[in-house]
């Protein structure tokens, strides 16, 4: 039996993206970090972009921030096998002006260039819910003027899923943790819970839809 078209689409996209030179981030990258996890999941997490560890390994969220994200998933009884994880840009964005790379947010033009991969990726997966991890992802997929501290945890309309919401980035939480309390970690855990519950509810509804149509048709014919 041939592989489901979803996996074929994603594999083709991954291969095509692996040689992309559409923006300047291609110049210093080691790996294009396409994404991984369960492509059949009802929930996709979209981060900002690869850091040092991710660039080295080719895998999303494997550095310090990634470990905190894993913990937040685990606190909800979830692993990476339950969700799909990818990023706004697929190559590392860093400032190299001091000789030592310092991670930075992707620019608007880098973000725009990389939508050629992200949008078809989301279309192939067709999740019920997208959870944007951090402000750059929310500005890309929800609205340009998204205010992460005010608007995180709220549902928005989406062209790429049934609904979309955003949460704090674990790298931001790690920085805040040094200053006070849990740095917003409990908000991250709560937003993942909210996103996962909605994703499951919406997926159940989708699974029921053909049955409901069949019943209606049956009723009509009788
Ligand atoms: N931060 C991100 O936004 N994405 C990663 O893959 C790693 C760190
Ligand atoms: Fe291509 Fe995206 Fe990498 Fe830019 S960041 S080179 S658009 S894959």
Image (cartoon, rainbow, N blue to C red):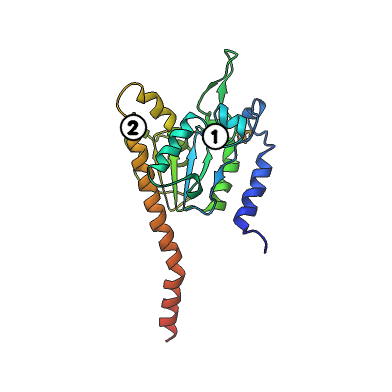
Give residue 189's quadrant in the image: top left
- Residue 117 point in image, percent of width and height: 60, 42
Residue lying at 40% horizontally and 24% vertically, measured from the top left: 175
Element marked by disc 2: loop
N-terminal label among 2 and 1:
1
Query: Where is ligand 2, by quadrant?
Result: top right
Q: Is residue 93 above or below residue 58?
A: above
Element marked by disc 1: helix
- Residue 207 point in image, percent of width and height: 45, 65
Residue lying at 68% horizontally and 33% vertically, measured from the top left: 21
Q: Nearer the viewer, mark 2 or mark 1?
A: 2
At label 1, counting other C-alpha atoms closer than 10 Å, the crowd grade (few under 14, some 14-19, many 20 or more) is many
Q: How many marks?
A: 2
Instruction: Note whether residue 160 is visible.
Output: no
Give residue 187's quadrant in the image: top left
Residue 158 is marked as none
At label 2, counting other C-alpha atoms closer than 10 Å, the crowd grade (few under 14, some 14-19, many 20 or more) is some
Q: Is the CB of mark 1 within 8 Å of ligand 2?
A: no
- Residue 218 point in image, percent of width and height: 44, 81
Q: Is residue 14 above or below residue 2?
A: above
- Residue 41 point in image, percent of width and height: 49, 52
List the residue tagged with mark 1.
Answer: 111
Q: Is residue 175 left or right of residue 81?
A: left
> The N terminus appears in which quarter of the rendering?
bottom right
Q: Is residue 153 left or right of residue 104?
A: left
Q: Is residue 205 above or below residue 146?
A: below
Calculate the distance from the C-alpha at mark 2 to the C-alpha at mark 1: 26 Å
List the residue tagged with mark 2.
Answer: 184
């Amino acid at each position: 039996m041939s592989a489901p078209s979803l996996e074929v689409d994603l594999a083709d996209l991954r291969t095509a993206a692996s040689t992309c030179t559409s923006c300047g981030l291609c110049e210093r990258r080691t790996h294009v970090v396409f994404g991984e996890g369960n492509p059949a999941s009802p929930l996709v997490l979209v981060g900002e972009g690869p850091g040092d560890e991710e660039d080295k390994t080719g895998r999303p969220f494997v550095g310090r921030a990634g470990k905190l994200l894993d913990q937040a998933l685990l606190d909800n009884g979830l692993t990476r096998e339950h969700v799909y994880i990818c990023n706004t840009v697929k190559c590392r964005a860093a400032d190299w002006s001091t000789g030592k790379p310092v991670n930075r947010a992707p620019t608007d033009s880098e973000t725009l260039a990389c939508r050629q991969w992200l949008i078809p990726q989301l279309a192939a997966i067709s999740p019920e819910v997208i959870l944007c991890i951090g402000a750059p992802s929310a500005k890309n997929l929800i609205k340009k003027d998204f205010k992460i501290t005010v608007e995180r945890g709220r549902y928005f309309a989406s062209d790429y899923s049934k609904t979309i919401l955003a949460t704090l980035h674990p790298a931001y939480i790690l920085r805040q943790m040094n200053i006070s309390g849990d740095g917003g970690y409990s908000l991250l855990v709560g937003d993942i819970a909210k996103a996962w519950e909605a994703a499951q509810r919406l997926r159940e509804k989708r699974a029921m839809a053909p049955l409901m149509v069949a019943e209606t048709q049956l009723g009509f014919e009788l």
